[in-house]
Amino acid sequence: MTTVLTFLHSVICVLLVAVVLLQKSKGDGLSGAFGGGGALTASFGTRGAASLLSKATTALAVLFMVTSFLLALF
C-alpha cells in the first residue's frame, strides 16, 4: 500500500510541477521558452488554456494533499 501511494505521489508531484511551469506568467513562462506560446493559444484559445491549466493545477494540488495525508497515516 505504501509503495503504491509513494509511486502515485511521485507521479502527481511531477505532473503538478509541469502544469505549474506551463501556465502563463507575466512573461511567457516555460510555454513561451519552447516556442509554444502561439501554439498553445491556437490550440486552446487564450482563455481556454488558462482555465484548463488552472483546473488541472487545482485537481493535482488536491490529489497531492490527499496522498500526502494518506502517506502520513501509513
Image: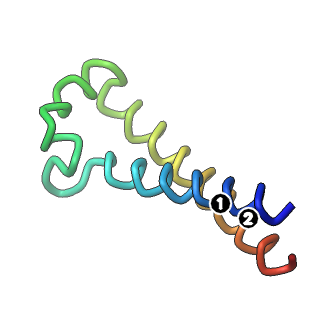
Q: Where on the picture, by quarter, is residue 1?
A: bottom right
Work out whether residue 43 or residue 15 is closer to the camera in this orientation and state it.
15
Q: How are the residues colored?
A: rainbow
- Disc 2 secondary structure class: helix
Say whether residue 16 is left or right of residue 27: right
Task: Identify the residue at horizontal 70%, vertical 63% (top origin).
Answer: 6
Work out whether residue 34 or residue 38 is closer to the camera in this orientation and state it.
34
Task: Identify the residue at horizontal 64%, vertical 63% (top origin).
Answer: 64
Quadrant of the image containing the C terminus: bottom right
Q: How far across and down, in percent of the image, does residue 10 sit?
A: 59, 59
Work out whether residue 11 or residue 55 is closer to the camera in this orientation and state it.
11
Task: Identify the residue at horizontal 70%, vertical 72% (top origin).
Answer: 68
Real-space CA distance between mark 1 and mark 2, rounded to the nearest whole angstrom: 6 Å
Instruction: Please give the residue where the numbered disc 1 appears in the rendered image.
Output: 9
Instruction: Please give the residue where the numbered disc 2 appears in the rendered image.
Output: 67
Structural crowding at the residue carrying mark 2, measured as other residues with C-alpha within 10 Å and reported as few (<14), some (14–19) or many (≥20) = some
